[in-house]
Image (spheres, rainbow, N blue to C red):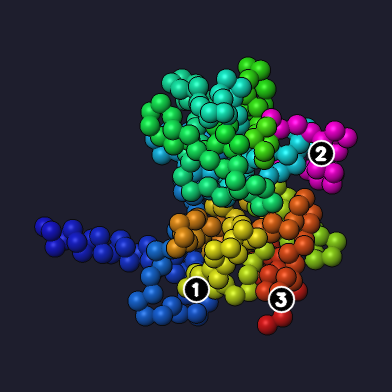
Amino acid sequence: MATWRNASLAVTAAAVLALTATACGQDKGSAAPKGQPVGNAAQANSDTGYGYGDSGYGSADKTAAKSAGQLAVWDSKSLGKVVTDSAGFTLYRFDKDTASPPKSNCDGDCANLWPAVPAGSVTAAPGTDSGLIGQVTRTDGTKQLTIAGWPMYRYTKDTKPGDANGQGVGGTWYASAPDGKKAKPAADGSGSGSGAAEPASLPGLSVRNDPKLGKIIVDSRGMTVYRLKKDSAWPMKSACTGDCLKKWPVVAPVEKSNTEGIIQKGFVTFNRPDGLKQQSINCWPVYTFAGDTKPGDTNGQGVNGTWFAVTPDAKLVGATK
């Protein structure tokens, strides 16, 4: 009986391995080295990745709340600069909390509606003060992310990246700015200043027609997506590690259903050796650039002759072999 069970598990594992291999290049004739593991590539289906789902963060298991990962900042015309987690979900602060000393006063039912953001492995948004990132111990003993001392939360009624449905709720909940203060628009009301669409209007990954580069992939904030020429798709490997990631943050996992106009083949999550989860397109790891400050920027194009914007079929724009 045990022999039959072991054989069955082996067949199942082999089937998964074969599917991932097909997704990431083997069907194109690029055979993997003998014994090459592919455990770092997991299918990014609707129930994987960061687990927010189309029904919002509230549908996720509260006991398995996800770290915010690589923080980001987007310019909202109505709210100003807003901090989001790596999946594009707005982070909030609570007026009844305190920042000095840091203390959360949202427990019980409050925490069910406003899940605390775990301290976990969090990286400051590019261009912001990493010294403001901290943590506080909650009454249940768990560690919660703080920015400038203010505990951070998500809102269960935010159902997709870019939502800010928690803004102003009860006159006590507000989206957080990068400095931990309440997000507010610029004094001149310029917001993003680019006339670009709000992040909520964009899918997780979609296509923009750039006047110079043509059709390129952008994320939910409208920021240009890049590939590194030194990476490989099979075996899937990233050559951007350590300090490189401060300039070139990874694109967090995106649900395949939350994309528009891009290639669906090889749309998998790359489980990096450093613990980060990174989206890949046609099995190529993808990134954004800290030097892009607003939607429409393409300042990362051609940097060092190795970084390039990405076409809808995951090719490098303007790269030479």
Magenta residues, start to end: 182-203
Mark 3 residue type: Gly
Q: Position of residue 296 (x, y in %)?
A: 79, 54
- Taking the spot 45% from the left edge, 79% from the top edge, the residue there is 31
Specify the quadrant that holds the C terminus: bottom right
Left or right? Give the position of 148 relative to 212.
left
Q: Is residue 307 above or below residue 133?
A: below
Element type at marker 1? loop
Instruction: Give how far across and how far down residue 212 sits, in percent.
Output: 84, 65
Q: Which residue is mark 1?
A: 234
Tag 1: amino acid:
Trp
Residue that label 2 marks: 191
Q: How many marks?
A: 3
Q: Residue at x 43, y 29 (%)?
A: 138
Which mark lies nearer to you, 2 or 1? 2
**Residue 317 appears anywhere in the view:** no
Q: Give the image location of residue 271, x and y in percent.
A: 46, 59
Q: Which quadrant, please, contains the N terminus? A: bottom left
Residue tagged 3: 305
Residue 251 position (above or below residue 234): above
User: Between 145 and 1, which is closer to the camera in this rendering?
Assistant: 145
Q: Residue at x 39, y 74 (%)?
A: 36
- What element does badge 2 sit on? loop
Spatial distance from mark 3 to mark 2, Cα to Cα?
33 Å
Asked if the residue under mark 1 is in contact with the one under mark 3, i.e. CB atoms within 8 Å, the reply is no
Residue 302 forms part of the magenta stretch: no
Identity, as a three-letter code, of the amino acid under mark 2: Gly
